[in-house]
Amino acid sequence: MEKGAIPKKVIYRLSTYHRCLQRLSENGIETVSSGNLAKAAGVNSSQLRKDIAYMGQWGTRGLGYPVEMLMLKLRDALGREKLQPVILLGAGNLGSALLRYQGFQKEGFEVVAAFDADPAAARKRGVSVPLFLEEELETFLAENQVRLAIICVPAEFAQGMVNRLVRSGIQGILNFSPAVLEVPKEIVVNSVDLASELENLSYFIR
């Protein structure tokens, strides 16, 4: 399947379906109906069937989807047939917390290296991922096939770091810095603004 053939919103939902199927598989469930999978993923059955149709016709009317086979197909569509290497920039409090998170590998990603102005400080926070000085970024990327990066640097340094990542071949960036990043149109950036998310939540609890 060509890159970009599946809309971005559908990719998000396919990822959710994959996580739901993982839980079903862990519980020994071999087949799931579109209704039950849709309910677990928080969508309606019609939407789920349309999304899965991007990967061809799957499932049997009256029987549902074979869990393991659909998981494999989703992994292939999401590019997760093998662990995807990721690097992280900025191993401060938030960055170090992400580096200690054990769930990335379960979801098909491996943080292979982190870069910081003070790697020694990050090591004191219990980070076991290989840590390097920021100056070593380009050399590492030239020697390793990595296309994904997580950014947790202060806002004033974010754009400069992104420019370096783009020049070094990074294609996808998960941005935790409170900054609006400018990148070429072929580069994908997903930004997570924690303060903004809390602000949105606060509106609903007045």
Image (spheres, helix red, strand yellow):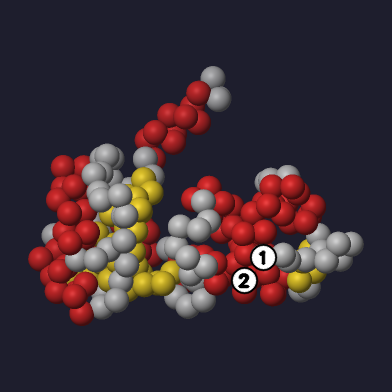
Tally of numbered discs: 2
- Which residue in the protein does label 2 denote? 73
Query: What's the residue at 76%, 71% (across, down)?
Result: 66
Give how far across and how far down residue 71 sits, in percent: 64, 70
Residue closest to the far top: 206
- Which quadrant is the C terminus positioned in? top right
Question: Where does the image place residue 41, in percent across and percent down from the top left?
Answer: 67, 51
Determine whether the residue tagged by mark 2 lies in a helix, strand or loop.
Answer: helix
Q: Compare residues 106 and 67 and report the one nearer the observer.
A: 67
x 15%, y 69%: residue: 138
Q: Is residue 32 above or below residue 42?
A: below
Tell me where residue 27 appears, x and y as whole percent.
74, 70
134 vs 87, left or right, is left
Above-or-below relation of 15 to 194 = below
- Is residue 150 visible to us here? yes
Front residue (pair 55, 196): 55
Image height check: is 175 above or below 201? below
Q: Nearer the viewer, mark 1 or mark 2?
A: 1
